[in-house]
Amino acid sequence: MEVVICKTKEEASKLAADMITAAVKKNPKTVLGLATGSTPVLMYNEMAKAVKARKVSYKQVKSWNLDEYYGLAGTHDQSYRYFMNENLFKKIDIQIKNTHVLNGLAKDPVKECAAYEKQIKAAGGIDIQVLGIGSDGHIAFNEPGTSLASRTSIVYLTPSTVKDNARLFFKGDMEAVPKSALSMGVGTICEAKKIILLAFGENKQDALKGCVEGPMSQFCTASALQAHNDAWIFCDEAAAKKLKLKKYYAWRSATKLGL
Ligand code: PGA
């Protein structure tokens, strides 16, 4: 696991975006796994800037998103499909038919999730998976207690995630936040060839500590990344505050990134 600690989230987002831009330049048919939430927005803005500056094109890129609220249509302004359209897809030259988000209105969620896994496999698997991290250590909607081998399925949100998501979205209304979702599993996520996890702010200190230095455990599903051989964590100093091996990570990432 490479842990890149930057002074600010702006700096970390730019570095992560540069990594994606370089990969898409090298392979214009890159398959991306994408995330929602407040965390990746700055990185998505940087990706859009690179497209505007004609440094890269997403015309042949395909994407699969991590998750979607169960019960929300993709047209709902709090759905993750809507979020992706507004925060990334409209800003880059990706073809919307090449973007995939689980259908929150699927009548048969089991079938929907199985079909999603099949599509990813048929595309050759995910080359780069973008992740945020929940304050309880979740990745996608894989809450504490989820098997680290889990596959895409219908899942239930913990009260702390409902609270976090109500604070940032849904105008603070916890009742309005759906309590279930369709989500890629931890096992599905860990099959991506490269993983980029972003973590910013004090609220993520404990989760990041568990992810990077805690025991690998289903009680912090992000810790599954410890067993991945190409996982990158881009974080700011606030999120990294509780990490013990900060100096070592700084030395190693500077060496690897040529900073
Ligand atoms: P956030 O959510 O980016 O809004 O903090 C992260 C997550 O829950 O994965």
Image (cartoon, grey):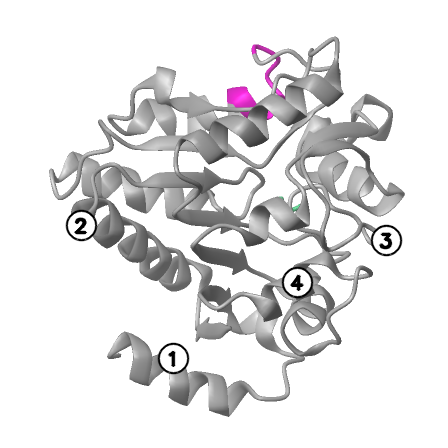
SS under mark 1: helix
Q: In the rendered structure, are the residues bearing label 3 and label 4 in contact, judged by CB atoms less than 8 Å apart?
A: no
Instruction: Answer few, some or many: residues within 10 Å of disc 4's Cα (few below 14, many 20 plus, some between 14 and 19).
Output: many
Nearest to N terminus: mark 1 or mark 3? 3
Q: Nearer the viewer, mark 1 or mark 4?
A: 4
Q: CA distance from mark 2 to mark 3?
A: 38 Å
Q: Which residue is mark 2?
A: 26
> Residue at position x 21%, y 45% from top?
27
95 shown above or below 22: above
Q: Mark 3 sits on what residue?
A: 145
Q: Amino acid at mark 4?
A: Ala
Q: Is residue 74 above or below residue 227?
A: above
179 vs 21: above or below: above
Q: Which residue is mark 1?
A: 253
Q: Badges 1 and 4: C-beta atoms under 8 Å apart?
A: no
Relative horizontal placement of residue 6, taking residue 1 as reference (left or right) = left
Residue 136 visible to an observer of this rendering: yes
Identify the main secondary structure in magenta.
loop
Measuring 40% from the left and 40% from the top, which residue is drawn there?
A: 32
* Cα gap from disc 1 to disc 4, whole angstroms: 20 Å
Nearer the viewer's eye, disc 1 or disc 3?
A: 3
- The amino acid beneath tag 2 is Lys
Which image quadrant is residue 36 in?
A: top right
The mark lying in front, picked from 1 and 2, is 2
Give the camera-side residue of 29 and 81: 29
Task: Kindly identify which residue carries mark 4.
Answer: 224
The amino acid type of the residue labelled 3 equals Gly
